Image (cartoon, rainbow, N blue to C red):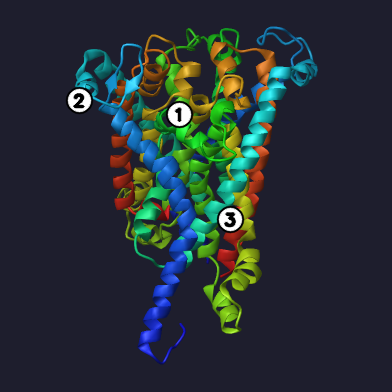
Amino acid sequence: MKRVATPGLETQAVKEKARQGFLIGLPSIVYLIIFFIIPLGYVIAYSFATRSRSGRTELRDWNVDAYVRLGEDVVQAVAWRSLWIAALTTVICLLLAYPLAFYISTRRPVIRNLLLVGIMIPFWSNFLIRTYAWRVLLSSDGLFTKVVEGLGLGDGRILFTRPAVILGLVYGYLPFMVLPLYASIDRIDWSLVEGARDLYASGWKAFRRIVWPLSRPGVIAGSILVFVPSFGAYVTPAILGGNKESLMGSYIVDQFMDARNGPLGSSLSVLVLGVMLIGTMIYFRQGGRNL
Amino acid sequence: MNKGAALSTAEPKGASRWALRMHSLLIYVFFYAPIVVLVVYSFNDAQLVGDWRGFSLGWYEAFLDNDNIQESIWISVKVCVASTVISVVLGTMAALSLERFRWWGQKAFDAVLYLPIIIPDVTMAVMMLAFFNETSQLLNLIPGVDLSSGLEKLVFAHVAFNISFVSVVVRARLANLDATMEEAASDLYANRWQTFRRVTLPQIMPGIIGGALLAITLSLDDVVVSSFVASVGGTPISVYVFGLARKGVTPLINAVSVVMLSASMLLILASLGFQRATQFAREEK
């Protein structure tokens, strides 16, 4: 801290510094207002706009028809299916990731860092190509199909079915579950577990009463990070799913590209945004920022 | 910190310990086996993907001879360079502003800056589509901007999400730095710019490079936003490959995919390396 004799000068200096900070942030603020906030405003405006006969979205005759249409059976079916698939993906990811995150955080530092890099590479690298790799494996003469049939596990041709989409989503988003779980498990004070064991708690009991509750912020953060993108997924169903079962992401894209129904596509996008905002609020309430 | 003793009690014994190890191993196999298979098949000397006819570089040659692919790679590179430069400058300034200053409205800015990271791709894509539909005539009035080629639209859209990623990475670096160095510089009569140029910038450089590499990767890999924004004839490589991959599997896409995935993984590895420098700085502290 600088010490200034005159308090007046000091408040002036603080004000001056605040002004500088604002000015440094200003270019990004302006950029995000123009290229993020205003676009967001347009989507909200579109959802109340009118669709002309030629399929153009016209910003006049404001109405809530696009929201009324969310109640239609077709739309409801898509929404519930997406919700169900996203929930299932989240649960599978949690079950797969928890033991792995636990294993990683109990390794020596060198090994731990290597294992973490092994998760971060799929976390950040090309999602499209990673999904495409599964299309190669699942194709009718692909390796997955051959192995499943070779082992006598039944029909291995699951491409273009719901299991293929869930498999693709789990593959794509599993790293999003592992990393926050690892972060919260790693922070656990293991001497608590040691204490519990000294007091004759079984290994299972020590886990259930100490490790699990302390890792809950990671469970919640990871679940949201998997659930939200799975709910709005577009690439995975487009590559691994069939055209019988639309999911939210592809349904929204269809509204803009094929059906040319901007207002409905926009009200659906607002719905996805709503799901995201609820998720984010829970995330931050759980102290997710520290993860 | 010695947590080894306590850890050893936490670790399960016997069969469950073995199960835990097997489980973790299988997950890594799950992560990497599909990629290995893709790489192997890309060297397959056959028209059909499924049957193995021996090693060949033929599909990589076909990839180099394909004009469409070359052209879309070129578009991707141009968009990626422009969007990375802009987002690194803006993102670094945003990081400085949030980490080193206190001002009114800062919290709101911080919150908005997180949105592009968590917003689902499809929503972001729809936002950009609606925005450019309504404002392209207006934006075209800006001198030097011509949206008809679609390149500028791609750059604008990529910057919109990359500012956030760059600023998160740079902030992590800034947060781990000792602000007293900067204060010492200003006590020695360095002005703000000199302090930034000579003290802060060299120290946050690993964060900036890490953020830039991440921005490059995210720009090259983006599919959904780009496919909504790109004009006909101006498709970046990821959108081009997406179009082909939806139709089916061919050895040519396998080869292109391997090249794209390798680029993506190498960039990420490099980015993590630079961010790791950040973490070591924290551990020493």
- Viewport quadrant of the C terminus of chain B: bottom right
* N-term mark: 1 or 2: 2
B12 relative to A22, above or below: above
Q: Position of residue B76 (x, y in %)?
A: 64, 31
Q: Chain of mark 3?
A: A
Residue A265, above or below B275: above
**What residue did someone put label 3 on?**
A109
Q: Nearer the viewer, residue A59 or B11?
A: A59
The residue at which mark 2 appears reads as: A64
The lab-note entry on whether marks 1 and 2 share a chain reads: yes
* Image-based side of A15 in relation to B270, left or right: left
Q: Classify residue B241 as left or right of residue A278.
A: right
Identify residue type, mark 2: Val
Label disc, if present, on residue B194 of the rendered structure: none
Q: Residues within 10 Å of mark 3 (few under 14, many from 20)?
A: few
Q: Is residue B214 left or right of residue A267?
A: right
Residue A125 vs residue A51, the one in the foreground: A51
